[in-house]
Image: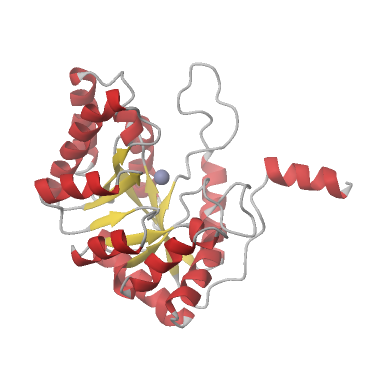
């Protein structure tokens, strides 16, 4: 294949090769193993689902680079059911279940639809390997003002579900930092609250740290223009840090633009070690301890 043909194939297709394994076990606090990038079949809102064989191979590839603990995250009722079922059958997986804020705020969420969907999330949250409610929160980028009241009502309901089941809350925050703190302060945050793909600056990181929240950093940390994000990570106590892929999205450098996978977490962990000036092994140990404090043990 010519060089241009191969780089074209890379952009569209295969996830990049696995990096060097980590010297101590670490984790991916937020992945979507069900989602296959590409065109969605007509009438299927989820798109193409990953096959069991592909999912098992992807988990094995993550374990091979010492990414041994994964949290599989649902974004609607079908993917939350799928996440709970995967966690029930796979020792390396715990699940998070929720309606994504864009799902809750997209207009079809009249009161009755939302109530029925939330009842199913509540039911799934009772399963023993479902250890978080999320991703929930507010998205003021993709949802317009007409969807904000439904989105906030859904967020408040998810906070209540997490507290009643004694599980962690996983927050999706897109251009809604202040609004999210307002709702969390008003409702009272669950004991363990994680900002997935933390996207704030140093001031917002301080506001989260002082409330005891956990900041999970994704591959965006490695992007050239992410100076303020690196500043936020640097001031966060190591015991309040987590790491994630949000795969198949947000692929770390040098592979930005290609599909992400949990086995690429070592790229972000190494960046985090440099930014926080922490040795790699103690950092991995701290990330694992934090994940087990927040989500409970994987019992592998
Ligand atoms: Zn996500």
**Percent position of residue 81, x then y:** 33, 36
Q: Quadrant of the C terminus?
A: bottom left
Q: Is residue 248 left or right of residue 294?
A: right
Ligand 1 picture quarter: top left
**Percent position of residue 28, x then y:** 43, 59
Q: Residue shown at 22%/38% (left/top)?
A: 155
Q: Residue shown at 24%/48% (left/top)?
A: 178
**Percent position of residue 39, x then y:** 59, 27
Q: Is residue 46 above or below residue 161?
A: above
**How many numbered marks does the figure carry?**
0
Quarter holding residue 38? top right
Q: Is residue 206 above or below residue 169?
A: below
Q: Residue shown at 41%/68% (left/top)?
A: 231
Q: Work out whether residue 5 can be spotted.
A: yes
Q: Work out whether residue 68 can be spotted.
A: no
**Percent position of residue 221, x then y:** 49, 61
Q: Is residue 95 left or right of residue 58?
A: left
Residue closer to the observer: 224 or 193: 224
Q: Residue shown at 35%/32% (left/top)?
A: 102
Here the colouring is secondary structure
Q: Is residue 240 left or right of residue 152?
A: right
Q: Is residue 59 left or right of residue 255?
A: left
Residue closer to the observer: 66 or 10: 10
Q: Is residue 187 above or below residue 39?
A: below
């Amino acid at each position: 294949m010519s060089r241009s043909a191969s780089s074209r194939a890379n952009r569209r297709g295969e996830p990049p090769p696995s990096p060097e394994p980590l010297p101590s076990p670490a984790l991916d606090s937020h992945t979507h193993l069900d989602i296959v990038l590409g065109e969605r079949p007509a009438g299927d809102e989820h798109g193409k689902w990953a096959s069991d064989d592909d999912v098992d191979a992807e988990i094995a590839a993550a374990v091979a680079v010492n990414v041994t603990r994964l949290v599989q995250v649902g974004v609607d009722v079908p993917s939350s059911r799928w996440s709970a079922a995967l966690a029930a059958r796979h020792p390396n997986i715990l699940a998070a279940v929720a309606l994504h804020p864009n799902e809750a705020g997209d207009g079809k969420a009249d009161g009755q639809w939302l109530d029925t969907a939330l009842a199913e999330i509540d039911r799934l949250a009772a399963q023993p390997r479902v250890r978080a409610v999320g991703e929930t929160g507010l998205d003021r980028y993709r949802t317009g003002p007409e969807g904000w009241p439904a989105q906030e009502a859904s967020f408040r309901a998810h906070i209540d579900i997490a507290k009643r089941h004694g599980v962690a809350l996983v927050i999706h925050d897109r251009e809604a930092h202040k609004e999210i703190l307002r709702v969390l302060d008003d409702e009272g945050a669950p004991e363990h609250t994680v900002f997935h793909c933390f996207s704030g600056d140093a001031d917002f990181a301080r506001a989260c740290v002082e409330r005891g929240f956990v900041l999970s950093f994704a591959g965006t940390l490695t992007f050239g223009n992410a100076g303020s994000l690196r500043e936020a990570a640097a001031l966060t106590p190591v015991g309040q840090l987590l790491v994630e892929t949000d795969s198949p999205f947000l692929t770390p450098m040098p592979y930005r633009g290609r599909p992400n996978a949990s086995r690429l977490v070592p790229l972000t962990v190494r960046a985090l070690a440099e930014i926080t000036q922490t040795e790699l092994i103690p950092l991995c140990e701290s990330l694992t301890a934090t994940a087990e404090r927040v989500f409970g043990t994987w019992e592998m």
